[in-house]
Amino acid sequence: MRAKRNLLRSESEVKVTNVELFFDLVFVFAVTQLSHNLLEHFSPGGVLQTGLIFLAVWWVWIYTTWCTNWLNPDLTAVRIMLFALMLAGLVLTTSIPKAFGPLGLVFACTYAGMQVGRSLFMMWSLRAHSPENYRNFQRITAWCAVSAMFWISGGFAEGNTRFALWLIAIAIEYVSPALGFRFPGLGRSSTEDWNVSGEHLAERVGLFIIIALGESILVTGATAAKAPASVATWGAFFFAFLASVAMWWIYFNVGAERAAHSIEHSDDPGRIARTAYTYIPLLMIAGIIVAAVGDELVLAHPTGHVDGKTAICLLVAPALFLVGTLLFKRVTWGRFPLSHLVGLALLVVAAPFYGAFEPWVYSGITSLILCIVAAWETFSAAEPSRKT
């Protein structure tokens, strides 16, 4: 009997492949759906529901990214697995606007099927070639199967019951890596057994951040194209773009490269990957999504008084992004960058004065704060010993 072909990457195969980039296209649509969903349901309940869906979307993407860190996407079997996940992801994303309505069961079954199905594929791929990781995915599959029961039960339920069941389901999945996927009868995984490619994982997460920033720019352009031409409209358009550039600069100019170097040379890359590239990016991406909503609100009504919804978006978006990059750099650099702390302090100072400015001007103030952080970090980058 012929042995099953090894589907794992070699240590030299760290480059992101074209099929991985193709896979990401589904999540461009997902980010768009999330921002539109937040805009249409901007209430405490709507924010919580959108946040829960966002956690699910991110989790299915980052789990797949971990899998392609170990598997070789250029092989046919792995490509077919990714294409199947793409199709399921398209169904998942299409159902987002009505996930807490008539399409709840579709969303739940699709999500649970993606999580369990991909984990089973990993077990099949790893069994003959990586015993330690095979046992790891036995535990992951068990945890995903438990959470799937809550997802599907929530799909049959309605209202607050659905939200509660799905909240339990997502909590199970988010807690399990921190517990080492400890499961009765299967033992516990160690981060030292997670032989990850830091370069590949860093590039993949960076690409998702670019996806989110790209969606923000698309929203800005599409909304501006429909708005009547005026100084306020063009000012709002410019400041929205400036904020996107500043966020890109804050993450990529210094942070991403240093973080990739840190994880590549770590004695326990799995531990850094679990924290810096699995949990923390949620804050940065959430900030970008909220920024897209804020940009759309400002461009729709650039003059007049800043209402509470717009003020929340303009302040919370950069705050989330700065907190995310602050924690990311703390984990990968070993310190909190002073520039980010100052940026957060400036947002706190600006918060009470939102009623004194027109929306497009207040957007400019929050964008300027991000630019200050980006410039501070850039000018101090040449002096590694200084706090940035």
Image (tube, rainbow, N blue to C red):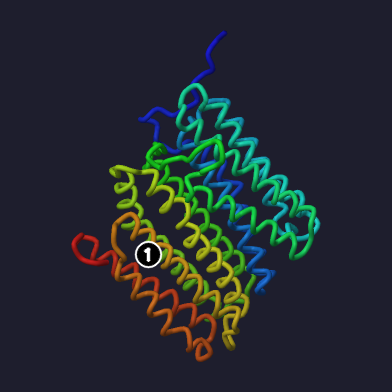
Q: Is residue 121 left or right of residue 382?
A: right
Residue 96 appears anywhere in the view:
yes
- Counting the numbered discs, the total is 1
Q: Residue at x 49, y 48 (%)?
A: 177
Is 24 displayed left or right of 158 in the figure? left
- The quarter of the rendered structure image containing the C terminus is bottom left
For label 1, the residue is 326
Residue nearest the observer in this picture, 279 or 359: 279
Question: Taking 329 as reference, is 351 left or right?
Answer: right
What type is the residue that disc 1 sits on? Answer: Leu
Residue 339: quadrant of the picture: bottom left
**Image: 212 above or below 306:** above
**Where residue 250 sits in the image (x, y, percent)?**
37, 63
Residue at figure coordinates x 76%, y 53% from the top left: 155
Circle 1 packing at 10 Å, graded few (<14), some (14-19), many (20+), is: many
In the picture, measured across the screen, residue 366 lies left or right of residue 157, that is: left
Q: Residue farthest to the top?
A: 1
Dot 1 falls on a residue whose secondary structure is: helix
Q: Quadrant of residue 249?
A: bottom left
Q: Position of residue 263 (x, y in %)?
A: 33, 46
Instruction: Name the one closer to the observer, 382 or 175.
Output: 175
Which residue is farthest front? Answer: 185
Instruction: Please provide percent x and percent y for residue 319.
Output: 45, 71
Q: Position of residue 35 (x, y in %)?
A: 61, 63
Decide if residue 18 is in sight here: no
**At x 33% / y 60%, what residue is drawn?**
330
Frontmost residue, 183 versus 157? 183
User: The N terminus appears in which quarter of the rendering?
Assistant: top right
Residue 100 vertical placement versus 149 (above, below):
below
